[in-house]
Amino acid sequence: MNKQEYQKAVEKLNLWAYHYYVLDDPIMTDEGYDKLYHELVRYEESHPDELLANSPSQRVGDVVSEGFTKEKHLSRMWSLEDVFDAHGLEKWLQKTYRLDNSVTFYCEPKYDGASLDLLYENGELVKGITRGDGSVGELITQNVKTIRSIPLTIAHKERIEIRGEVVIFKEEFEKINKERLKKAEQLFANPRNAAAGSLRQLDPKITASRNLVFLPYGVGINSLEHKLLSDKMSYIYELGFREPPLRAITKGYDEIEAIYEQMQKERESYAMMLDGMVVKVNEISAQIDMGYTVKVPRWAVAYKFPAVEKITTLKNIILQVGRTGAVTPVAIVEPTEIEGAIIERATLHNFDEIERMDIRIGDKVIILRSGDVIPKIVKVLANERSGNEVKVERPKNCPVCGSELLQEDVLIKCQNLTCEARVVNSIIYFASKPCLNIDGLGNKIVEQLFNAELIKSVLDLFDLTMEKLLNLEGFKEKKAHNLLNAIQKAKGSELWRFINALGIEHIGEVASKMIAQAFGLEYFNAVKEELIAIDGIGDEMAESYLEFMRVNRETVQKLQVILEPVAPEKKEEAKENPFKGKTIVLTGSMSKPRPKIKEMLESLGSKVSGSVSKKTDFLIYGEDAGSKYDKAVSLGVATLTEDEMQEFLQ
Ligand code: IVH
């Protein structure tokens, strides 16, 4: 192969891959592709300085990363407002027509996967970023390059962010789960989880093996001048991206409904999972005029498909013991497929619910799975009983430690503080995201450490050593090192994480933040009067907090010495102003995101609350203010527009 032949080979391989992965219309055999690919790799090895950026060899990520870094999106990634039926659509259309009654609508599938932002500069893919919170995501460029339907280079040379959904096709999903079943690995609950999980693998080889597919649905930063979204998208597809199985420009309600019906009928035959249809204003200038609320564009809506129900058989009810000792029943059902996901478990909430529905083992039941929620049993088909169904008794003893259970309201609880399930789950909770956020310390590892008697409580985590970990199955130096590092990183965490991690009943993330803000490192000496003086902390919470601190005094102090949590800075006293010390409620959409306005008011010494009551001093409202405004008026609370608020401040 010479230089010219090498360049030709890159072109050929890319063309074949485009036909295979984007057009679903292969023009070369796998064998033929592999043969040329190997020749190309050999040439690149001997001529590294001639390597082309769009060579297919650049898709094999061979560096395993230690973790992902955060990356800001150049423009925000928005979410979508949902409507669930024809009435919802009609209301949304009316609202939209009030803003502009001349618009048309672009309809396309709502894919069920993980959103992804691709940044191309000079025609080259330079960054792939997960959605994250919409402003900041994680940089996963290496993984993204392994996705064959994402071109490494495009003919558009100006900077552009291309946005879309990464999905796993239904067939591929089943293949992966079958293999996992064979290897006794945990099954993926649905293609969306499988896609999102595969995208965030530290080893790009795993991502590559999952055959992910990218389906674009829009652009972020761009210099395109198309007047219609439909034209903009056609241009994106021409750049080498995959088209949706159905898209259409529609005029009004009836046409939108017709496309929705068609998509819903056809979706079974589509390769990917959909959870609805997205309706977008097609005229870009109208989109710009309509703008955004705090969270979503006013010019688009997700018209969801109805949730899918299936009949299956209840095989068993198992009991799970959580960190608070609460014993919850979980239904094990005959595995059944709903919309591409294999359902084996469903929530049952509590035993009152089981009795209310009179669910018996062996019953035929209807389970419902809607979007991302855990499936639930919605109905028992009692008239299909054979007589062999078995009633389930309320348990009297803990299924894990055997000690007696007590009924507390609707919950049945294990009272044994040293119950293995409670201990293990409280350690898992301690390490979880809203607590100390210790990477790599999930269910499996905690159970393994506990079973090997390396940890009996959270304190033991800090006595783990390389030597101890290397004795465990599956732990090599790197994994052990990463875990020890992650545990060390918990030192110096924010105080609210520390308080939250203690797992005190009734004290969650929000209460932990309030306590940390109010008491700082004196959190330990708080007394009841001081606690209930905090808005949002009631009697029961205060009692629970104080009781916990009394009983666990020693452990908490030891943990504090080890972890050295950092207290938040004391807020400076605000200067005199009309809003200082006042309770304010915000409603409607405003010129800036509401959290920004809330922050500004809080810096002036106001308390911004979520609901209107007699205690509210001012309601500040923006566009489309609804029930809060009505309530404020009926209670005689002073109301101000956003502009009036600004005038007030000057
Ligand atoms: S547009 C400016 N279009 O749904 C509007 N989103 O529920 C931003 N999604 O985060 C989104 N298919 O990940 C849009 N055809 C489609 C979509 C789509 C799936 C996802 C996307 C977004 C989420 C919002």
Image (cartoon, rainbow, N blue to C red):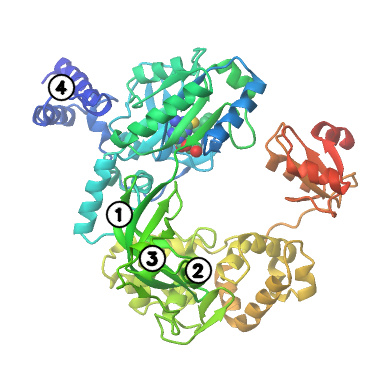
The residue to which callout 2 is attached is: 356
Neighbourhood count class around disc 4 (C-alpha, 10 Å): few under 14, some 14–19, many 20 upward: few
Q: Position of residue 518 (x, y in %)?
A: 74, 63
For the N terminus, the quadrant is: top left
At mark 2, the secondary structure is helix
- Measuring from the top left, give residue 409's x and y in whole percent: 59, 75
Closer to the eye: label 1 or 2 = 2
Q: Which residue is mark 1?
A: 336
| Proximity of marks 1 and 4: CB atoms separated by less than 8 Å | no
Task: Give the tally of numbered discs.
Answer: 4
Query: To which residue does mark 3 refer?
Result: 331
Mark 2 residue type: Arg
Dot 4 lies on which element?
loop
Question: Tag 1's secondary structure?
Answer: strand
Q: Relative to residue 152, is residue 1 drawn left or right? A: left
Residue at 18% across / 17% down in the picture?
Answer: 8
* Residue 91 position within the rendered picture, expressed as x and y whole percent measured from the top left: 61, 31
Residue 82 lies in quadrant: top right
Within 10 Å of the Cα at label 1, are there few (<14), some (14-19), or many (20+) other Cα atoms?
Answer: some
| Residue 521 placement (x, y as % from top left) | 69, 68
Q: Is residue 601 left or right of residue 289?
A: right
- Taking the view exactly as shown, the residue that stands out farthest to the front is 383
Separation of marks 1 and 4 at Cα, in angstroms: 37 Å
How far apart marks 1 and 2 lie (CA) works out to: 25 Å
